[in-house]
Amino acid sequence: MTAYDYVVVGGGTAGCVLAARLSEDAAAEVLLVETGSALGPPAMHLPVGFPLIPAKEILWSRWTTPQPGTLSRSHHWPSGRVLGGSSSINAMMHVRGHRAVYDGWADSGAKGWSYPELLPYFRRTETAMGRNPALRGVIGPVWAAPTTQLDDGSLTFLGALTEAGHDLTDDINGERQHGAFWCDLAGAGGRRQSAADAYLVPVLDRPNLHLATEADVSRLVIEHGRCTGVEYTSFGTVERAEARGELILAAGTVGSAHLLLLSGVGPAAHLRDVGIPVLADLPGVGANLHDHLQCPVVFEAGRQLTTSHGFSTVGALVHSGATAVPDVQLMLLDAPADIADVGTPECGHTVAFAHTAPASRGTVRLRSPNPGRLPLIDPNYLADSADVSAMLVALGIAREIGRMPAWGQWGARETAPGKGDDLVAYIRRNAATFHNPVGTCRIGMDALAVVDPDLRVHGVDGLRVADASVMPSIPNTGVNATVLAVAERAAETIRRDAKRP
């Protein structure tokens, strides 16, 4: 067994930040354990390379349980299984979410996580030139900027959004956090910039930073109420790494909950049912799972518009009227979505919408005590009637935008949903994940919280969680920019605590 001061489990977005920041202390030995490979295929580094990547090489290919709210469909939940995690395969969008989301975290028991308190960590992640430096970073690792490639699809979409009354904000991550916007992308020199590219690759030569990749983690080692390390298999050999100081779990919303459950930390009744010895009865582990759903409105066009990325880098965050936070995200895809029982137009495009403040909550649970078996993922989509109502409003907003005069030069005509369609059934039949699951190890001090405001696991010493799983509620857009800030805050807290006598 080899000992380290810090062991970080999970080399995705959060894990790369943690490993890089914790190893800034030359006296601290840091191990980063990642199930996937250190290097993905070349296509992974291209801004539009995702369709070219062989899925089995760098993806977790997980599926949800059949969802009653979406007509018993199971939903594919792919995520990155490589250094950088999903930041290595996502759409590169660097959008923080509305300040009121984070103020809501603090109000619900996550003391210290309000927007003003989290803002320094958002700024620490990024270099956003030409933006307001009071709100945006100027020396961070992630280069965040709108694309310089203007395309007819994005310009047309922007025109339609403004015609529909959604005015352009000059920076969706700045002062005015609603309306139409040019999206900041995480990229540099025409290449994707994952968290691994931004944080980890520049510091791989540090002698105190160690990597264990292609390492299948089976469990956390917990002895006498303290996490002392991790057990994993690498190239057929079972290894154990000891954490002298702390172990930080950063395996993602599904992975972190799964590992805690496998290690005996979670709801006691569930653990006993699957034959796992209970080491800490934490009923909130794996609960509070929620995710954004997106759904398409499809248009046939007389000629094909194009975008520079396969999707428009213009988007919008607007209000459904149900909350104070803009809770509808709108996107343009430069191809018509395939809709069951509806012919796909030869030329066309899709205006996609997502409800970004879901009320429905689900779970992650074990299938068995075998760590090689994927967990049961039940997001409980559309179980709350408020989510159905919000999706209907969002659908109406998207259809209205599709009727604006800006589309005139393309001869756009809506083909799905069709006239007379049952719109609730249409949503249930066609909604899919927006790839932003959060919440299974949420911050708080109540009986269902998993970590305290400093991300320490309740009831287990020497163990923290720092990834999207700790979010009490979901940001109203993609979550990668928030995960970067969560990890920055976690690293600072860990280093601060290490200096205390």
Image (tube, rainbow, N blue to C red):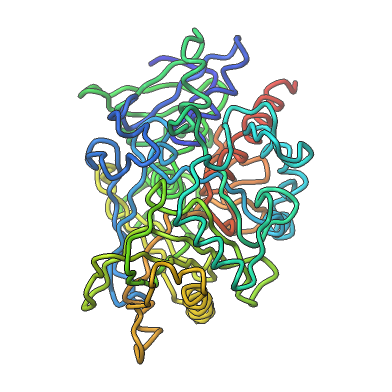
Q: Position of residue 128 (x, y in %)?
A: 65, 35
Of residues 212 and 298, the one nearer the viewer is 298
Horizontally, residue 375 falls left or right of residue 157, namely left
Q: Position of residue 180 (x, y in %)?
A: 61, 60
Of residues 375 and 385, the one nearer the viewer is 385
Q: Position of residue 145 (x, y in %)?
A: 58, 39
Up the image or down, 50 lies above or below 294; here it is above
- Would residue 228 be seen by someone viewing this image from the given angle? no
Up the image or down, 254 lies above or below 293; here it is above
Q: Quadrant of the N terminus?
A: top left
- Would residue 37 be seen by someone viewing this image from the given angle? yes
Q: Quadrant of residue 216?
A: top left
Q: Position of residue 28 (x, y in %)?
A: 58, 14
Q: Quadrant of the C terminus?
A: top right
- Residue drawn at x 39%, y 61% is 433
Horizontally, residue 422 falls left or right of residue 394, namely left
